Image (cartoon, helix red, strand yellow):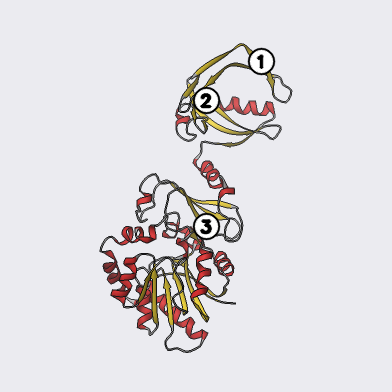
Amino acid sequence: MRFIPTRPPRVFGVGADGAIKLKECAKIELAPDEIVTFRAEGTQYDVTRKDFGYYAMPSLNRRLGRYGLKAALVKSYDATFYVMLVMKDKVKEFRRYLRETGQGLAAWLDGKETLERLAGRADQRDLPACLCGSRSFDPLFHYSSPPAGETGFRFSGGKYLRDVLRCSVCGHCISVHAMRMEGIYGGGYVDATYGSDGMRSAFRKIVRLRRTKSDNAGRVRAVRAFADRRGGPRRHRCILDVGSGLCVFLRGMKKAGWVCAALDPDPRAAKHARDVVGVKAVAADFMKVKPFGRYDAVSFNKVLEHVEDPVAMLARARSFLNKDGFVYVELPDAEAAAAGGPGREEFFIEHHHIFSAASFGILAARAGFALKELERLREPSTKYTLRGFLALP
């Protein structure tokens, strides 16, 4: 640290008429990671130099308050903004000062609600555009720790800060955080969700459910019914399930007489589909694999919310689809789930996107499909789901 006194102090006027006289008494030069602390009347705050700039004060909603100060965002008479630190026992004097100088209190910066609202709006120019094209988001939920029931991934085991933001135009939600999720569907997702030998046991547990308790039984009925309504030959219908996971859905479709193929990025899931369910299975990245056939239906069951670009992934289904085929899509329903609060599984960290009915339609249109049917339901597992059928225009 280098202390450079100003002798004599430099005196200058501020305010609308320059009537307030300030004295510049010294300059302090700090090296990175050096701190200087200011004290007055039992209060204090510190400034920390970093290689990128400064921490201008202690944490707004923790240490600053313990030092007897409140941070205020103030709008001046000339539409400039300042952050002022107010002694907690002198708020009246502060408000009188604002009145006398023609300034206004924009916000106290120590309240959780205000800070989280600002955090939700921070750096929105750097956020990806919503599916509808808007960059206007409102904060929906803030997380400082994983919600109960969320799968514990390696990448989320450290510092956990995350926000779910809702598009102010179409109601679509996005999950925003700095944790690195790359590559988890090549192995990490199965490891964290099912464990080393958990796929078979989870599969057996689900297939033993009564039909009225099974999400998969419902989706099998829905897909078969739509195919019947759509018409065409009923024999030898074929379906590709992208992100097949435990392959319970294809088990049901196979029993219904469909020719089934599974695609999953995890080789263990593909092996499970071949060995346990007895269907053709490919272990590959859907966005990179060469088309290996044409199908009457392509299904994405709770898959598109897991990728950053669901439009591109859905659009790729056209390369696997027969001319008169259709796409079946299930997505988490943000509008219905929001009322259940931040602990709903629809908002868990593995979901980059949580959809509204409007954004479902936008997704279909941007991927080059016509939305033929859309249903909102609560499944037997209690998941809030948007179920839709798409076809080429």
At x 56%, y 59%, the residue is 171
Q: Amino acid at mark 3?
A: Cys
> Dots 3 and 2: beta carbons under 8 Å?
no
Q: Residues within 10 Å of mark 3 (few under 14, many from 20)?
A: many
> Dots 1 and 3: beta carbons under 8 Å?
no
Residue 303 badge: none
Q: Residues within 10 Å of mark 1 (few under 14, many from 20)?
A: few
Residue 360 in the image, given as x and y percentages of width and height: 54, 67
Q: From the viewer's perspective, is the residue at label 2 or at label 1 nearer?
A: 1
- Per the image, the residue denoted by label 3 is 173
Residue 11 badge: 1
Residue 89 badge: 2
Q: Nearer the viewer, residue 367 or 80?
A: 367
Q: Nearer the viewer, residue 353 or 357?
A: 353
Residue 202 horizontal side relative to residue 64, left or right? left
Residue 341 in the image, given as x and y percentages of width and height: 45, 55
**Disc 1 on helix, strand or loop?**
strand
Q: CA distance from mark 3 to mark 2?
A: 42 Å
Instruction: Tell me where residue 383 sits by quadrant.
Output: bottom left
- Residue 167 visible to an observer of this rendering: yes
Q: CA distance from mark 1 to mark 3?
A: 53 Å
At x 64%, y 15%, the residue is 10
Mark 3 and mark 2 lie on one chain; the one further toward the N terminus is 2
Q: Amino acid at mark 2?
A: Asp
Q: Amino acid at mark 1?
A: Val
Rendered position, 50 above or below 160 = above
Residue 247 in the image, given as x and y percentages of width and height: 35, 72
Q: Nearer the viewer, residue 31 or 106?
A: 31
Rendered position, 45 above or below 300 = above
Residue 386 in the image, given as x and y percentages of width and height: 49, 68
Residue 99 horizontal side relative to residue 295, left or right? right
Q: From the viewer's perspective, is the residue at label 3 or at label 2 nearer?
A: 3
